Amino acid sequence: MEQLLRAQLHTKTLRAFGSSGGGCISEGYAYYTDTGPVFVKVNRRAQARQMFEGEMASLEALRNTGLVRVPKPMKVIDLPGGGAVFVMEHLKMKSLGSQASKLGEQMADLHLYNQKLREKSKAQQNTVGCGAEDAEPRGVTKFGFHTVTCCGFIPQVPEEARGWCLGTGITGSCEPLDVDAVNKTLVLWENSNYCYPLSQVSSLHSSSLWLKDTAAF
């Protein structure tokens, strides 16, 4: 694997540091390279590339908000014997401690990010000189991510939908679904909006905030 990493990362230096470890799904390694330290996740299962590509897209989306600090994703590489590796920026993590409240504020801002983009876009529609060609990010009106992501190792179907109940990737469940029951639930939810006119706005969020995924920098 190290020979493959040298070639794909175009680096002569590839020196392991720290202690390698395995989580519930993938293994993790840290290396020094010509351009700085990297963190490498390894998974040898057949669906590893799909899982890592979804994680890469998720990190890019989070980074683009400028609200939270996440590793810069670099590359997904296929392993010759099957599986894949995901290379990203290595971050030195410290205990959250007194910074936990700041992370909570950042998560709240992240949940409101899309709503604020939509409000800004709506305001700009009535402003002279702010055309559709502006390169600023724009909010989305539908629910669901644009590519496959995974809950653990279970693919979540990237189906954009009008409402959150339709856009939560329920078809990625590992258990067979009662299609009739699901359809009845969706119809009931859609009809309830007429009785209780509440506005649900899609938001970008991180679903993994356990101890080893959060830190201060």
Image: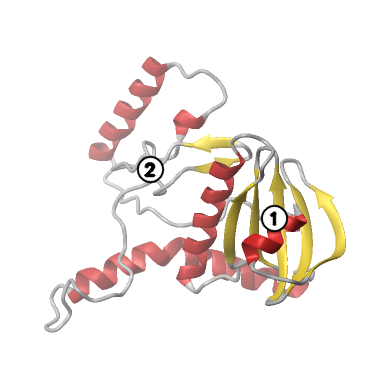
Which of the 4 image quadrants contains residue 56?
bottom right
Q: Is residue 215 visible?
A: no
Viewer-proximal residue, 8 or 128? 8
* Residue 55 screen position, x and y as percent: 56, 52
- Residue at figure coordinates x 42%, y 48% from the top left: 145
* Residue 186 screen position, x and y as percent: 34, 29
Viewer-proximal residue, 4 or 43? 4
Q: Is residue 123 visible?
A: yes
- Residue at figure coordinates x 30%, y 51% from the top left: 199
- Extreme-right residue of the structure: 19
Q: From the viewer's perspective, tell me whether residue 179 is left or right of residue 62.
A: left
- Extreme-bottom residue of the structure: 129
Instruction: Specify the color scheme.
Output: secondary structure
**Residue named by callout 1:** 4
Q: Amino acid at mark 2?
A: Trp
In this view, 27 is above or below 100: above
Answer with mark 1 or mark 2, whichever residue precedes in sequence.
Answer: 1
Return the mark for residue 164. 2
As measured in the structure, the alpha-carbon distance from the residue carrying label 1 to the one carrying label 2 is 41 Å
Viewer-proximal residue, 57 or 194? 57
Q: Residues within 10 Å of mark 1 (few under 14, many from 20)?
A: few
Q: Secondary structure at mark 1?
A: helix
Numbered disc in front, either 1 or 2: 1
Which of the 4 image quadrants contains residue 188?
top left
Q: From the viewer's perspective, tell me whether residue 95 is left or right of residue 88.
A: right
- Which image quarter holds the C terminus? bottom right
Q: Secondary structure at mark 2?
A: loop
Q: Amino acid at mark 1?
A: Leu
Q: Residues within 10 Å of mark 2 (few under 14, many from 20)?
A: some
* Residue 44 screen position, x and y as percent: 70, 39
In this view, 135 is above or below 58: below
Which of the 4 image quadrants contains residue 117?
bottom left
